[in-house]
Amino acid sequence: MNELTSPSTKPTWREWLLAEEPTSRRQARAVGWYQGWLAFRSNTLAMIGLIILVFLIVCAIFAPLLATHDPYAQDLGQRLLPPGFQGNLFGTDSLGRDIYSRLLFGARISIYIVLLVAMVAPLIGLIIGTIAGYAGGWIDVVLMRITDIFLAFPRLILALAFVAALGAGIENAVLAIALTAWPPYARIARAETLTIRNTDFIHAIQLQGAGPVRIITKHIWPLCISSLVIRVTLDMAGIILTAAGLGFLGLGAQPPSPEWGAMISEGRKYILDHWWVATIPGLAIFAISLAFNLLGDGLRDVLDPKESGQ
């Protein structure tokens, strides 16, 4: 009798993750994540974006193993070779450096910039937006007017101003992009906070004696995360383009760093006769920007309750 009933008492992992009535908080969280993954996996374009992004990240991590040449080695005798000639998969640039190898190491710089900005800008916006939305009054007015000032300037122009003040370099470029990228996150966090602060469960928490700091960090921030994650993913393409624009103007990563924007800037002088020098880094920027946009659309469909309810 025990042998007959044992299979039903020990469900498989899939049955456990698809349970309609979770028996614990841990199982409920796991069920939510798994159902979100199933919904995301059903989106073909989002999966394409994820595959492209994972491929680029793997290429960046294993760049020393995948590169066929030293990305900094110059050989003027091999300058401006076309793709596929003498073992140069994507050709060489004006200094004889292998474009394929520089592209792999350049992916590290682009992903490094994206990760740093993604950690700094949303955090600044989350703090400012939730404080403004929860406190209200003159604090809300002051913080939102500062946000409006930042939003009044195009991101690239404002980033140029910050880099000009801070000096050229990849760290200063990251700081400048982060300082220009936080206002949209502040707006989203404020809007979410305004809809949450007058709900019954917030009033119940206040009656229990919780202070503003605890309410904001423990109860409001978690409810704002999903909206910010969607916005961050959709903003990654803009961050990469801004970083490439700074590199193109010589204000981002400095030579001889293989930054994609700087590679395009160098290749623009040869665009008519030696198209690959500027075109291939441009295609790399296009690919990673497209991947983040497709991934962001897929995450929005999964995480946004208004989208998933349609």
Image: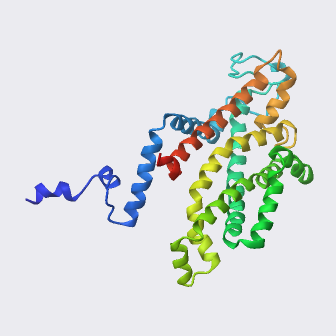
Q: Residue at x 69, y 40 (%)?
A: 237
Q: Nearer the viewer, residue 204 or 99?
A: 204
Q: Quadrant of residue 5?
A: bottom left
Viewer-closest of 12 and 190: 190
Q: Residue at x 86, y 45 (%)?
A: 157
Please say if 96 is above or below 214.
above
Is 229 on the left-hand or right-hand side of 32?
A: right
Q: Which quadrant is the N terminus positioned in? A: bottom left
Q: What number of labels is visible?
A: 0
Q: Looking at the image, is 81 positioned above or below residue 145?
A: above
Residue 94: x and y in percent read: 84, 24
Q: Position of residue 267 (x, y in %)?
A: 83, 26
Residue 92 visible, this orientation: no
Residue shown at 80% from the left, 17% from the top: 274
**At which x and y percent is residue 171?**
80, 52
Q: Residue furthest right?
A: 165
83 sits to left or right of 56: right
Residue 65 visible somewhere in the drawing: yes
